Amino acid sequence: MGALTKNTHRRKKRTFSEWIKSRDGQKVLVMVAFMVVPLILLAVFTYIPFGEMVNFSFYNMKYIGARKFVGLKNYAKVFSRDDCFGALKLSLYYMGGSVVQLSLALYLATLLSFKVKGGNIFKGFMFFPFLINGIAIGFIFKFFYTRGFVFDTVLQWCGFQLDNLPYWLKDRSINNISLVGTSVWRYFGQNMVLFIGAIMSVDNELYEAAMLDGANKFQQFKYIIMPSIKTIFVLNVILSISGSLSAFEPPYVITDGANGTGTYFVVMHEIAHTQQKVGLASAMAVVLLGIIFLVTIFQKLFFKYVFKDSTQ
Amino acid sequence: MTIFEKAGKYILIFLKYLSLLFFSFVALLPVVSCVITAFKSDVEYQNTNVMTLPENWLNFDNFINAFNKAGMARAFMNSLIILVCVLLFSTIIGTQLAYVLNRFKFPGNTLIRNLFLFASMLPGVAMQISVYEIMYKLHFINSLPGYIVMMCGTDVIAIYIYIQFFENIDISLDESAIVDGASYFTIFYRILFPLLKPAIVTACILKGVGTYNEYYCANLYLQDKNKLATVATSLYTFVGPLGSKYNLICAGVIISLLPALVVFITCQKQIYSGLTAGAVKG
């Protein structure tokens, strides 16, 4: 915006009303008129809170009432308290889940990109979970995993004995995997649609040429499909790292973080909005944003150097 | 083709359909089991296995009960108001912003794009810690308009969809209008905005589904659950004493996802293309 005002100064020979009626004036006017609202919203709901959050992290405070400056104490707590930084361990489950999810999505996208009878229906079925609201998902899976209910029944059809099955949401050795399963269930169809989009963007003539050259399906996959979606696939793998670190929804809506399922963000939410230790929660948020920021920089560098040739 | 090649081909086709059927089953099972249970009477629910089909597929008692208990009439009204306002405002500000960013070269153009992009990377749950304080200061807590204003904020995917679309509209269209003496406002609203229609439909469907399904901020900022519940947060009624009456809960869940289902069935293509467009650029 600074440059814009400079522009107006340069043309000061004309009066302001002349200038505002000129093309340049009109241009500036429309730019200001069209950008002022979105930029205010961006400032009020993103960048001001972002600054506030960093500020809060140095205080011992609630939303209302007195604040006490405590320096870096909150950060020390984040790293020393078992339920804070330790909760990041759970991200490993979610990273594992992302690998399963992306591989599954890639496999199904490949199948669906060839001629399939009823392909659109299969695609629709697998995509639909993405459109269900979070709270409904919470109820659906509380129901699904309840002892003797849906999941147990289906496993019994397959020959398992109910007595040998664990409590899917209570048993600490399995409950995080159950939760990750819901996340895979919800997003594999969406990933699949993204991959199909990338595969379809390849020129059809390539496939025809490959067929003429006698390439089989596997060769088509390796030499045509894989390169076309390499970028979006790796991008998704890296995005899944920050996604896993900030895993929140499955434990929040299904178990409420009970029985050792509280991920970093679930703990942070609880500390901020239930216990109202806003300073500590802010420090947790800042630490995680820092980590995500590093992952993103790594991603950019990775793309710059590893994918130099393929992006051209 | 030898007999082995032929056999191999059929096995592959068989495996292909087997995997598609299996994963469709996996995707549908949790929802279908809910539908089955939603049609069961209390007695039936307690005495049969959850996967046993209901006796009467026309037993809508649970749906009526759930609808009334959760105050869904009001919730649907609130969700509708939120949806209409958010879509209207975010379409106007989103297309306008995309127009300026795409058609005008000025210092700071890239900076603004990056500011929006960076904002989209910040996880919402973390941001709400301090947004909560801002909402409090603005008296936006327990206020439908306040929640709507917040939801109109940054939506990078929509902006990218619009920018991409603008890139494909020939700039000579603007130039010839300028020669004819049209103002920038006229160019935008009379010429470009109507052309943007397909992009607007796509962006609105995505944003609409997202807004309709949003529950975290709605729960945080619309605390008066009697008056200000949205469809998603009205489901919180079933937490607590009603928490084990799954025939009722499932009916509520099914009601809440019906609008998304209808939109999905009618607008599949736009949803897919919108997602793909957002992902490639973002």
Image (spheres, coloured by chain):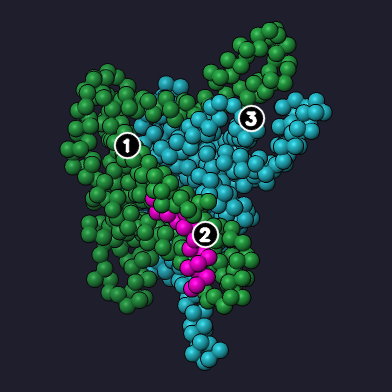
Chain colours: A green, B cyan
Alpha carbon of mark 1 to alpha carbon of mark 2: how far?
32 Å
Residue for badge 2: A228
Q: In the drawing, does residue A147 fall left or right of residue B53?
A: left
Magenta-colored stretch includes residue B232: no
Q: Nearer the viewer, residue A147 or A80?
A: A80
Quarter of the rendering containing residue A58? top left
Do we see residue A208 in this rendering? yes
Residue for badge 1: A290
Residue for badge 3: B104
Magenta region = A218-238
Same chain shared by disc 1 and disc 2: yes
The dominant secondary structure in magenta is helix
Q: Residues within 10 Å of mark 2 (few under 14, many from 20)?
A: some
Q: Position of residue A289 (x, y in %)?
A: 34, 37
Magenta-colored stretch includes residue A229: yes
Q: Residues within 10 Å of mark 3 (few under 14, many from 20)?
A: few
Q: Residue at x 53, y 32 (%)?
A: B110
Q: Amino acid at mark 1?
A: Gly
Is label 1 in contact with label 3 (beta carbons under 8 Å)?
A: no
Q: Amino acid at mark 3?
A: Phe
Q: Amino acid at mark 2?
A: Ser
